[in-house]
């Protein structure tokens, strides 16, 4: 089955495109930023890339240029508006296989995809190396957690995974699925923090063509797609109260009704949820339903922060260095003594995700055999002062004001606001929640 990467920050359009391609028996992976696309290409094997031109952290031409510098010859189609056709033509000179104008003509796009996939050499996967969270660690606290995973995985119990950002909640969810009797059925992950509230019901339950503006094709919802397998609802605390009611009904009745349809579809799914919030506090505040909480929380797994598992820090640091060396084609052999000591004393507020990014950053800068303090980001090596804390507070106030201004300019269109701010939609939603904007 061909494997296509979609690089597109318009979530609605990306979902539509992904659903259409899957119906044509195409395996699809979608990302919203150039940084995510680079990471995907380093770990997956793609037969074709569909890329938007304008992106939050650069543009499709930046990504195309980087691909060719890495000697990646993956066929590449640039998607662009009519006003940007001249720029798209320039991308052909950089090695793009073709371009197509928005709004997309699906018949034209399908012809281009078929032609390029048939001409492309068979996809050779990159050398196998474990994903960044694929080692468990050796500390007693994490070993106990994975023992709980092994105990609850074969059951049908709904599991709530609790953990800070960057601890690897989706990896644990996948382990639960892979160690269950549903392992050969689908595992469908839904990022509740990245779904606009007006699209949440469609994402969960699907819709029929013409049921609302923008519904140009029938869409299979996540519950139907996960039938017989597991559905993972990441950051479930971000769902609106109205969507929580719909979700509870679907879980209780074990059937869903796509938007605009009178047909009810029976679903058999194992529910796995995750949050980095205190849902019990949310219940007291009235923002999360208590009945839904008890439905999703038949068993709780708490993932410890990295600072709680200090003995695992050297293990993960070495693992991430191996991945960084492969992705960047470097040959750094380790960390000098000062760096190792700093790693053990640093609190790692971003957990494993932060460590992975820090080591990749330092590996890129390293000129010798070992990563030293001078290659690490400044926030790790600079001691904070009272003055810097005041500056940080001022910066947060400025950031909040900028977000509000962007939303006003975009008339509350969050996709457009994210583009104005130069961030992706998920980051914007997290900032809205952090600064309590729109609550």
Image (tube, rainbow, N blue to C red):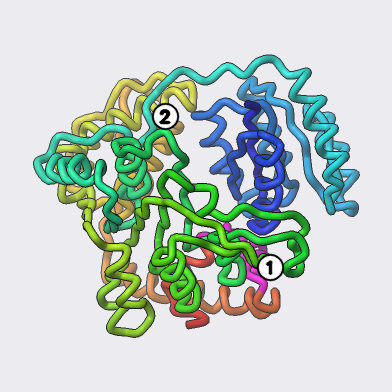
Q: Does 203 appear above or below 375?
A: below
Instruction: Tell which circle, 1 or 2, labels the residue nearer the N-terminal end.
Output: 1
Q: Which mark is residue 272?
A: none
Question: Is 389 left or right of 77, judged from the image as shown?
Answer: left
Query: Residue drawn at (22%, 44%), measured in percent from left and top?
Result: 149
* Quadrant of the image occupied by residue 311: top left
Q: Disc 2 designates what residue?
A: 324
Residue placed farthest to the left in the image? 140
Q: Horizontal and vertical percent for residue 152?
A: 21, 46
Q: Residues within 10 Å of mark 2 (few under 14, many from 20)?
A: many
Q: Is residue 348 magenta?
A: no
Q: Label 1 vs label 2: CA separation?
A: 47 Å
Question: Is 419 left or right of 346, judged from the image as shown?
Answer: right
Q: Disc 1 designates what residue?
A: 260
In this view of the protein, can residue 383 be seen by the observer? yes
Which of these two is toward me, 1 or 255?
A: 255
Magenta span: predominant SS is helix
Q: Residues within 10 Å of mark 1 (few under 14, many from 20)?
A: some
Which of these two is toward me, 369 or 328?
A: 328
Q: Horizontal and vertical percent for residue 424?
A: 57, 57
Q: Does 203 appear above or below 410?
A: above
Instruction: Tell me which segment is drawn in magenta.
Output: 413-426
Q: Horizontal and vertical percent for residue 14?
A: 67, 51
**Image quarter (top left, top right, bottom left or bottom right) of the N terminus:** top right
In this view of the protein, can residue 133 be seen by the observer? no
Question: Is 204 left or right of 406, judged from the image as shown?
Answer: left
Question: In the image, which is nearer the foreground, mark 1 or mark 2?
Answer: 1
């Amino acid at each position: 089955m061909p494997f296509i990467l979609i690089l597109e920050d318009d979530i609605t359009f990306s979902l539509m495109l992904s659903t259409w391609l899957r119906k044509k028996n195409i395996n699809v992976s979608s990302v919203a930023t150039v940084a995510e696309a680079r990471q995907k290409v380093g770990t997956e094997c793609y037969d074709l890339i569909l890329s938007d031109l304008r992106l939050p952290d650069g543009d499709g031409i930046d990504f195309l240029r980087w691909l060719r510098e890495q000697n990646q010859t993956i066929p590449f189609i640039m998607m662009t508006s009519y006003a940007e056709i001249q720029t798209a033509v320039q991308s052909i000179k950089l090695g793009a296989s073709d371009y197509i104008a928005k709004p997309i003509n699906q018949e034209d796009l399908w012809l281009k995809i078929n032609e390029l996939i048939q001409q492309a050499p068979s996809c050779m996967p990159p050398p196998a190396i474990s994903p960044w969270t694929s080692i468990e660690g050796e500390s007693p606290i994490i070993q106990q957690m994975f023992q709980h995973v092994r105990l609850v995985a074969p059951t049908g119990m709904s599991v709530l995974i609790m953990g800070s950002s960057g601890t690897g909640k989706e990896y644990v969810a996948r382990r639960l699925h892979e160690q269950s009797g549903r392992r050969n059925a689908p595992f469908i992950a839904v990022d509740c923090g990245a779904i606009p509230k007006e699209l949440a019901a469609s994402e969960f339950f699907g819709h029929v063509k013409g049921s609302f503006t923008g519904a140009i094709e029938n869409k299979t919802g996540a519950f139907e797609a996960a039938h017989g397998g597991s559905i993972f609802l990441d950051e479930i605390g971000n769902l609106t109260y109205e969507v929580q009611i719909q979700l509870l009904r679907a879980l209780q009745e074990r059937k869903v009704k796509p938007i605009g349809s009178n047909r009810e579809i029976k679903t058999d799914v194992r529910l796995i949820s995750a949050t980095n919030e205190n849902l019990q506090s949310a219940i007291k505040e009235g923002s999360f339903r208590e009945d839904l909480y008890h439905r999703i929380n038949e068993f709780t797994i708490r993932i410890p922060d990295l600072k709680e598992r200090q003995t695992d820090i050297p293990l993960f640091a070495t693992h991430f260095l191996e991945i960084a060396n492969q992705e960047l084609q470097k040959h750094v052999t380790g960390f000098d003594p000062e760096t190792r000591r700093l790693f053990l004393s640093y609190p790692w507020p971003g957990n494993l995700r932060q460590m992975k990014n820090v080591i990749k950053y330092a590996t890129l800068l390293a000129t010798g055999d070992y990563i030293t303090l001078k290659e690490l980001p400044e926030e790790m090596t600079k001691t904070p002062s009272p003055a810097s804390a005041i500056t940080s507070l001022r910066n947060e106030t400025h950031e909040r004001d900028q977000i509000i201004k962007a939303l006003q300019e975009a008339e509350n269109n969050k996709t457009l606001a994210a583009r104005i701010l130069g961030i992706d939609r998920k980051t914007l939603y997290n900032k809205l929640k952090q600064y309590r904007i729109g609550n």
